[in-house]
Image: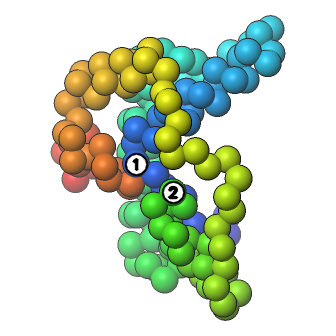
Amino acid sequence: MYPWSKFILNVSDMRSWIYSRLAHIERMKKRNPQRKIFSKDWDITEEAIKMWIKKRNKYHLSVLAYFSERPADLLIVNFLRDEHAATRVCNFLGYMGDFHRPKENVNPCKKRPEKHIEMLDNCIKELSISKIDLEYDIYCTSLESAETQ
């Protein structure tokens, strides 16, 4: 729809991303217990987690494929790991200088609920995701199939 647009892909390692998503859905469900579930992946289940992982992988691969001929139009950034992320984003958009990333909603030592840890560990095992893939920000090579290769 927007030819020659620039694209920023904000990424994080899989564990952090899944835990954040689980916590978000849990908070939303507590705030509004009457809310209807509109899709299978808006839930706190192992099936939902496996769906998220597969969708994330597919999405990241599609973004990389789409911008393979236009790498200058794609910025991949991890705000959690990269202390210069805000500067990179601003410079990518044409605002030169040094910028500080926001400090809001940052809690690197957050204690994860045991049930979340157990569910994710089960999903990782069932999907045969390697330990090294869990550290990758973009995609899991363990999930590659003949079709994605």
Residue 37 lies, with reference to residue 56, above or below; the image says above
Q: In the image, which disc is placed on residue 80?
A: 2
Where does the image place residue 136, in percent across and percent down from the top left? 32, 53
Residue at the location (31% across, 49% down)?
Answer: 135
**Please, what is the three-letter code of the amino acid marked with disc 1?**
Asp
Element under disc 2: loop
> Quarter-wise, where is residue 64 in the image?
bottom left
Nearer to us of marks 2 and 1 is 2
Q: Secondary structure at mark 1?
A: loop
- Residue shown at 49%/21% (left/top)? 113
For residue 138, say whether it is visible. yes
Image mark for residue 13: 1
Within 10 angstroms of label 2, few (less than 14), some, or many (20 or more) residues? some
Kindly indicate whether the residue at mark 1 contacts the one at mark 2 (C-beta within 8 angstroms): yes
Number of marks present in the image shown: 2
Looking at the image, residue 57 sits to the left or right of residue 111; the answer is left
Task: Return the x and y of residue 41 as percentages of the image width and height.
Answer: 55, 24
Which mark is on residue 68?
A: none
Horizontal side of residue 106 vs 121, given as left or right: right
Between 117 and 145, the one lying in front of the other is: 117
The N terminus lies in which quarter of the figure?
Answer: bottom right
The foreground one among 25 and 141 is: 25
In this rendering, would 25 be left or right of 130? Answer: right
